[in-house]
Image (cartoon, helix red, strand yellow):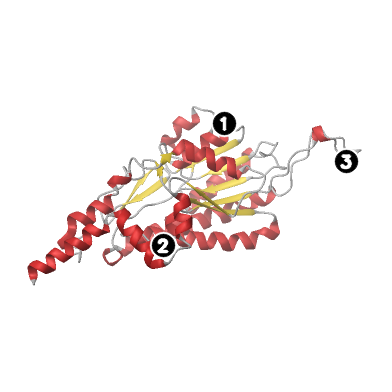
């Protein structure tokens, strides 16, 4: 059951075509006050046109985080806090682990892990303020038991860290990205226990297949990280010179490009409707699994490692890479 009071929700990474923007619209349409943020404010105009409050927030910049906290604080009355923080902004990087550019890998961890901790730490005072429900203007202060008509549904504040089913699934050439999501998942589980005594709930949002623009925006430069509004998309769709995978470059780069995934998955709008429905529900689970094949990914965590890897190889096309190496060895032999 949705809370009866209007909630204040802040979402990072709300550039058009992404899941953050879809969440912002869904929460807004549900009647809540949304702060939609991204590092490039010009890309937030479609949300602003719908009446959603937009803010500049580069989650990797301490000064930008500080400015966003000040802006949100200025709009809140002293008795209200931030009810929901959704750490959604993220980066992407595809590359064999042995070929990974370590500078790009560190940048990805800064975006996908440490930046979320920095944002959470900065907004925590406002989140803790939300643990005290606002007074009901319709209640009678002289009575100790409000009538059913004037009772509001208490809503314990939420911190939602958007990880991925990749946090529990090894996928070829996505090891750096998945490792960053796994790190965030572990930090999320730890925060859940640490903040529970303070009345704050912490949720791990594990998303599977959703059709967004993140794959289309993926850079083909394997040494840099490019930016698309609030979401970072690291390069890595091409192997570096001298890669041990050079003999099967075509097969590997096809998998790295994720071309076959562009049209797969549920729509961002469908995903957002399901996620918001869960987050506003009576009992929010510690982990929320949504997106195409999310249930399959969850079940895969319970099957033997070897069997799971064989399934992943078939799905990703790694068989073609193995066959390519067999042909190379046959020619050399």
Q: Residue 192: which numbered mark, if any?
A: none
Per the model, the C-alpha gap separating discs 3 and 1 is 32 Å
Residue at which label 1 appears: 29
Quadrant of the image occupied by residue 32 = top right
Q: Residues within 10 Å of mark 3 (few under 14, many from 20)?
A: few
Residue 258 position within the rendered picture, expressed as x and y whole percent measured from the top left: 30, 49
Q: Residues within 10 Å of mark 2 (few under 14, many from 20)?
A: some
The local secondary structure at tag 1 comes to helix
The local secondary structure at tag 3 comes to loop
Residue at which label 2 appears: 179
- Viewer-nearest residue: 116 or 252: 252
Residue 51 position within the rendered picture, expressed as x and y whole percent measured from the top left: 54, 28
Per the model, the C-alpha gap separating discs 2 and 3 is 51 Å
- Viewer-nearest residue: 245 or 238: 245
Q: Is residue 288 visible?
A: yes
> Is residue 246 shown left or right of residue 308?
left
User: At x 64% / y 45%, what residue is drawn?
Assistant: 83
Residue 176 position within the rendered picture, expressed as x and y whole percent measured from the top left: 36, 61
Q: Are marks 2 and 1 in contact (CB under 8 Å)?
A: no
Quadrant of the image occupied by residue 239 = bottom left
Q: Earlier in the sequence, mark 3 or mark 1?
A: 1
Look at the image and tell me in which quarter the N terminus lies. top right
The vertical placement of 126 against 140, above or below, is below
Residue at which label 3 appears: 145
Quadrant of the image occupied by residue 267 = top left
The local secondary structure at tag 2 comes to helix
User: At x 35% / y 58%, what residue is drawn?
Assistant: 311
Q: Earlier in the sequence, mark 2 or mark 3?
A: 3
Extreme residue toward the right, this view: 142
Per the model, the C-alpha gap separating discs 2 and 1 is 34 Å
């Amino acid at each position: 059951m949705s809370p009866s009071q209007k909630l204040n929700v802040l979402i990072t990474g709300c550039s058009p075509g992404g899941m953050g923007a879809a969440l912002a619209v869904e929460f807004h349409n549900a009647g809540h006050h949304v702060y939609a943020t991204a590092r490039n404010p010009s890309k937030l105009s479609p949300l602003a046109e719908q009446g959603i409050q937009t803010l500049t927030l580069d989650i990797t910049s301490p000064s930008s985080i500080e400015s966003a906290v000040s802006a949100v604080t200025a709009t809140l009355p002293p008795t209200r806090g931030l009810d929901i923080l959704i750490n959604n902004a993220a980066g992407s990087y595809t590359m064999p682990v042995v070929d990974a550019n370590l500078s790009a890998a560190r940048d990805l961890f800064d975006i996908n892990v440490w930046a979320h901790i920095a944002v959470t730490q900065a907004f925590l005072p406002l989140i803790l303020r939300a643990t005290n429900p606002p007074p009901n203007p319709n209640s009678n202060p002289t009575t100790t038991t409000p009538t059913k008509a004037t009772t509001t549904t208490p809503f314990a504040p939420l911190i939602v860290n958007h990880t991925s089913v990749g946090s529990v699934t090894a996928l070829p050439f996505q090891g750096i990205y998945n490792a960053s999501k796994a790190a965030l998942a572990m930090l999320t589980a730890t925060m859940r226990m640490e903040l529970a005594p303070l009345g704050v709930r912490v949720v791990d949002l594990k998303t599977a297949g959703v059709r967004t623009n993140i794959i289309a925006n993926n850079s083909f430069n394997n040494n840099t990280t490019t930016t698309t509004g609030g979401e970072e998309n690291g390069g890595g769709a091409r192997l570096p010179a001298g890669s041990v995978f050079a003999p099967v470059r075509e097969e590997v780069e096809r998998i790295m490009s994720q071309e076959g995934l562009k049209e797969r998955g549920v729509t961002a709008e469908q995903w957002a409707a399901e996620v918001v429905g869960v987050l506003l529900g009576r009992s929010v689970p510690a982990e929320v699994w949504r997106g195409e094949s999310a249930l399959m990914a969850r079940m895969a965590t319970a099957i033997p490692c070897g069997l799971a890897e064989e399934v992943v190889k078939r799905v990703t096309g790694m068989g073609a890479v193995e066959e390519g190496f067999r042909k190379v060895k046959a020619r050399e032999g």
